[in-house]
Amino acid sequence: MASTHGAEVLVASNRGPVSYELRPDGALHARRGGGGLVSGLSAIGPDANAVWVCAALGDGDREAVRRAGGGLLPAEDTGGQHVRMLGIDPDVHHDAYNGIANSVLWFVHHMLYQTPLEPVFDAGFRRQWAAYQAYNHAFAEALAEEAAEGASVLIQDYHLALAPRMLRQLRPDLRIGHFSHTPWAPPDYFRMLPDDIAAELLTGILGADRAAFLTRRWADAFTDCCHAVLGPGIPSGTRIGVHGLGADADFLRERSHRDDVDERMAALRAEIGEGRKAVVRVDRTELSKNIVRGLLAYRQLLEDHPEWRERVVHLAFAYPSRQDLEVYREYTAEVQRAAEEINSTYGTPDWTPVVLHVKDDFARSLAAYRLADVALVNPIRDGMNLVAKEVPVVSDEGCVLVLSREAGAYEELGEDAIVVNPYDIGGTARALHEGLSMAPGERAERTKRLAAAATALPPARWFLDQLQALQE
Ligand code: G6P
């Protein structure tokens, strides 16, 4: 197949580094995102011949693809990166992304199935599966077109589990890596999927030269699934890797001291009130983040330890996510109800126990990180969880981390955090009490050690290590 741009390094992911809003006057407004891949890819330098392949996610994106004639997006929108956005048919994308990736694969890997969302593997599922295959194939074709002879391709996450094998068939010359940003389900849970689908997902990823994960635990679960489902396990041609992703200390320290963050700190201090402590959480409103149990644990704290009433405020930032899915919309409403219930039960004219913010605001999140006394990170399951790593880096006076043992970050931060079983509301309430009661000296010492562990593998290194391992 002819190579269009002859790229030496390629990244593929559903969500790209830029998104577009189509304004009523027809103008397109580009918004650049952050995250590990963005800083990772910039670490290879502007001269590296790299292309990022991603999907168009909304009307603005699709219009941008149309204006780019299906080729690379304008460099001024992407900060100079070469980005090719795929204008995948909206129905195909909906079934692949909302249907398979976010309602099935996300739920399997995070072990989230429970009433009201249960797996239904019927004819509708099979139609969505065909869309997921087509979506993966569109990525494989675009990557095959863009890649130079022998190029390195890094394919990201559960949206694109089939693409490695598909790309291998189109371009046997390429070095292909797959990286999972989520946990991987253990075999007993993974085998809930229809057998042919389970096998297709595993062999899809095994089409890569390297399949990599955020922690050893998720890598081992993948290997166990290969043994359980495929029999012989990992073929000799595929290597398994582990690359933990850490916080970007330089970026965070600089960004968190800009004026907009100072302004938001002043506003948050006014909301918290003089002399009160702050328990902070920052998440997408996501079922795996376990926000409702976090609120119930805070409620339990107020119940068991009335001495904290009027002396603590829970700042809960729960930013909207995947709102096309009903189960996410319902969860968002449940979070709101739980916060309101606590406020109406315990609140007083001068004290609002829970301050819930649902509008995404990065500067405000950083402000909350700086002033938090306790950070609550209690996911049911999480590939890594970067909030747990960012808070200790940004904190002004030290912050106690209450951390779920089911987050990937636990492997690196477990020793200096207060560790909880995320299902145990009473245990989480006790952890909050312990955190709020911790002496300032110990709190500062622990924060220092947490920050060192959290920044050991900055995004640039995470990315370059993967690239190097793939090319070895
Ligand atoms: C997780 C996934 C990412 C995804 C992100 C946000 O971190 O591993 O691949 O981009 O959630 O979810 P969204 O569906 O909004 O892209």
Image (cartoon, helix red, strand yellow):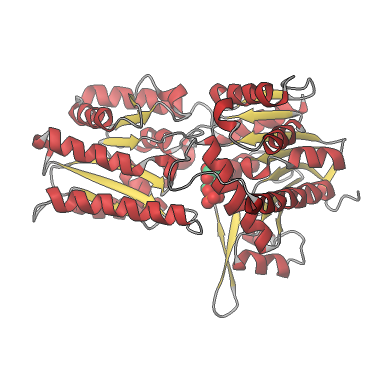
Q: In the image, 397: left or right of 318?
A: left
Q: In the image, 253: left or right of 427?
A: right
Q: In the image, 202: left or right of 395?
A: right
Q: In the image, 5: left or right of 187?
A: right
Q: Which residue lies furthest to the bottom in this view?
A: 25
Measured as percent of width and height from the top left, residue 433 is found at 20, 30
Measured as percent of width and height from the top left, residue 352 is found at 16, 52
Number of disc labels: 0
Q: Is residue 184 visible?
A: no
Q: Residue furthest front?
A: 122
Measured as percent of width and height from the top left, residue 370 is found at 31, 41
Q: Is residue 404 visible?
A: yes
Measured as percent of width and height from the top left, residue 371 is found at 27, 41
Front residue of 80 and 386: 386
Is residue 307 positioned above or below 351 on the image?
A: above
Residue at (72, 70) in percent of width and height: 67
